[in-house]
Image (cartoon, grey):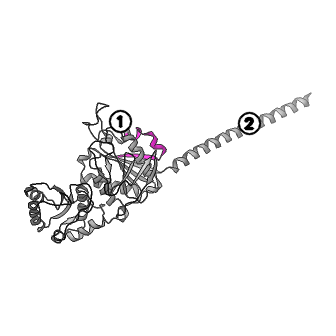
Amino acid sequence: MKYFIQAFMVVCALIGLMSGCSSDEKKSEKREIVQTKNSKTQNKSQDKPNIVILATGGTIAGSIDSAIKTTGYEAGVVGVDVLINAVPQIHNLANIQGEQIANIDSADMTNEIWLTLAKRINDLLADSAVDGVVITHGTDTMEESAFFLHLVVKSDKPVVLVGAMRPSTAISADGPKNLYNAVALAANADSQGKGVMVAMNDRIQSARYVSKTHTLNVDAFASPNSGDMGYIVDGKVFFHYAPNKPHTTQSTFDVSALESLPRVDILYSYANDGSSVAAQALVQAGTKGIVVAGSGAGSIHKYQKDALKKLMKNGLVVVQSSRINNGIVLANDTDSEFGFIGSRDLNPQKARVLLMLALTQTNDPREINEIFARY
């Protein structure tokens, strides 16, 4: 009996030991499963591109105390975090980080904000951990900001501007879908090397050609001289063409050391445009260049042109553009010989952007004419 009890105790001890080992093995197995799951989750996060959203304000960040009104709102009141949280689906497309650069109505855009934005984008895209940038922006001056960045960003990584035609409080707000499309575009591998783009109303536009073509409609952006660069359907990106003018890494413009830009203004030409007061006042205020929004193919009223010629003899640079948002403007042989420069297919506001950057390199009208031909 004594030996039986001893044997029984040994067997119980062995069973307890085996049970303990089994329990430890199960715990270890459970830990491995959890670690594997976490590892898969981490790898999934790492597989998604890293996109930074830079907010500058605009209608997409606008608000009014009515769900019906799409006018009379205050632009630039909603912060970047609110914009991101309003579209949680973008986290399925990319790892998202947000920064507030400004929060303004884009009608109040300044050269200082442009320079700050350009430098921040270049810093971000120099980081191998950042795959692209999306900029939320008001639509009024979006084409100008886009073209400026198109010429001064020094990376092949995607940069996409996006906005809205209706405030965030409207029942038909277009901002959330536009933001989703912009992130999809910036996260798409085929967006590399295509310069700065604009994503509005499912359409992709090149910064080089895009312009705002309607005051209120959600389908407010187009590229009259080139057509849409592409289209976005349910987050899927389709490209039709790539811009053929130099941009981003191919551009010679560098703003990294600049704190300001040369002053360039726009004059409008019209019937009975006989006063030279405006041009003279601008030059006296420090204007280095003037873009004329001429009639037809860039025509300038004779009285205005005579006044401009006098100012050009003292160093003013003048570019001829057109009030018409389609077509090409070339200075005729006589005007070209005098120093007038044709804007080609750039509208007045974009011609102003290029002239400002050209003046950071040269004051020679012939050299600036070559810059307009190139870009």
The kind of residue on which mark 1 rests is Ser
Give the quarter of the figure containing the C terminus.
bottom left
The kind of residue on which mark 2 rests is Gly
Q: Secondary structure at mark 1?
A: loop
Give the quarter of the figure containing the N terminus.
top right
Q: State the residue at coordinates (40%, 49%).
A: 52
Residue, far front: 296
Q: CA distance from mark 1 to mark 2?
A: 63 Å
Q: Is residue 268 magenta?
A: no
Would you call the spot at circle 1 few (<14 residues within 10 Å), some (14-19), or many (20 or more)? Answer: some
Residue nearest the observer in this picture, 17 or 158: 158
Question: Which of the 4 image quarters holds residue 111?
Answer: bottom left
Is residue 16 left or right of 188 when viewed as pictured? right
Q: Find residue 312 and report its horizontal and vertical position in percent.
A: 13, 66
Question: Which residue has dot 1 on it?
Answer: 172
Question: Which residue has dot 2 on it?
Answer: 20
Q: Find residue 27 and report its horizontal and vertical position in percent.
A: 67, 38
Q: Of label 1 and label 2, which has the lower sequence position?
A: 2
Q: Is residue 260 visible?
A: no
Of tags 1 and 2, the one toward the viewer is 1
Q: Find residue 147 and report its horizontal and vertical position in percent.
A: 30, 56
Question: Magenta region: which residues?
Answer: 83-99
Residue nearest the observer in this picture, 81 or 272: 272
